Image (cartoon, rainbow, N blue to C red):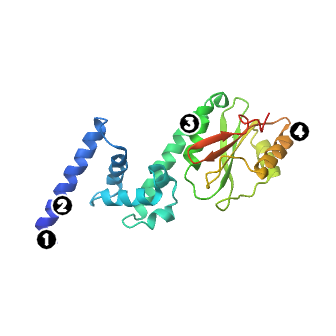
């Protein structure tokens, strides 16, 4: 490529990026352009529109891109190590922001933020994950443990380990959280049996199993709301 052509391309990219920033500042930017704008900060000297299209074509949504693993992202043409780290850093920042609110008092009485957090960490995941959220007596989040992860349709859960962890960190309330990558909106028989077993173990030492949440796509199903937990 000639020097003249390179200079012309540089001017075009700079002008396009400036237009994206201006549209964002005026709240006139489209959803697909938001991701493109983000990539301009990770890839400063290339046209990122095609890369953004490749990522969205692969993962379907911006959220799908964010929850993809670093290793998966690097496999996309045009996405290097630094870009993958940038994308995962954006995702981590979003998670930390939600955790800030979950650290506030009485979060279990305002479940919408809990539901949003659940969707953020598990929607669009390709494998099943089982999280345990531990809350103190003021219903503030102490920690979100990734208890286990498995295949596209199964994880292994250890109720006694959950009890031990709750006692060690002086938790008083527990929320179970897992996903169904296949999109099933129903708790399995195994899910229900685990819920009942763990509730019995926790209650025996004065702790509460507040809820068991299931993420399926962008929907969150509550064991409490569906009368599995009463």
> CA separation, marks 4 and 1?
76 Å
Q: Earlier in the sequence, mark 4 or mark 1?
A: 1
Query: What secondary structure is found at the residue carrying circle 1?
Result: loop
Asked whether residue 186 appears in the rendered view, the answer is yes
- Residue 98 placement: quadrant: top right
Residue 38 lies left or right of residue 208; in this view the side is: left
**Disc 3 residue crowd, few under 14, some 14–19, many 20+, Cα 10 Å:** few
Tell which tag, 3 or 1, sits nearer the viewer. 1
Task: Sort mark 2 into few (<14), some (14-19) or many (20+) by Cα contacts within 10 Å.
Answer: some
The residue wearing badge 2 is 9
Q: Do the numbered discs 4 and 1 sit on residues whose CB atoms are within 8 Å?
A: no
- Residue 99 seen in the figure: no
**Residue 204, position in %: x, y?**
88, 39
Q: Earlier in the sequence, mark 3 or mark 1?
A: 1
156 and 229: which is toward the camera: 229
Residue corresponding to mark 4: 204
């Amino acid at each position: 490529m000639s020097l003249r052509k390179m200079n012309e391309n540089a001017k075009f990219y700079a002008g396009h990026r400036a237009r994206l920033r201006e549209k964002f500042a005026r709240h006139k930017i489209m959803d697909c352009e938001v991701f493109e704008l983000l990539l301009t900060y990770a890839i400063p000297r290339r046209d990122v529109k095609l890369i953004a299209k490749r990522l969205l074509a692969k993962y379907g949504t911006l959220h799908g891109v964010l929850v993809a693993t670093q290793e998966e992202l690097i496999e996309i043409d045009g996405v290097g190590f630094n870009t993958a780290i940038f994308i995962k850093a954006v995702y981590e920042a979003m998670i930390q922001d939600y955790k800030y609110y979950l650290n506030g008092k009485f979060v279990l009485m305002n479940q919408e933020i809990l539901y949003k957090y659940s969707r953020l960490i598990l929607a669009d995941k390709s494998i099943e994950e089982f999280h345990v959220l531990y809350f103190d007596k003021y219903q503030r989040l102490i920690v979100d443990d990734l208890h286990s992860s498995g295949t596209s349709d199964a994880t292994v859960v250890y109720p006694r380990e959950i009890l031990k962890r709750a006692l060690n960190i002086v938790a008083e309330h527990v929320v179970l959280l897992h996903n169904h990558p296949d999109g099933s909106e129903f708790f399995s028989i195994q899910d229900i049996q685990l819920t009942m077993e763990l509730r019995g173990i926790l209650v025996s030492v004065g702790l509460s199993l507040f809820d068991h949440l299931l993420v399926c796509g962008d929907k969150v199903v509550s064991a409490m709301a569906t009368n599995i937990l009463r």
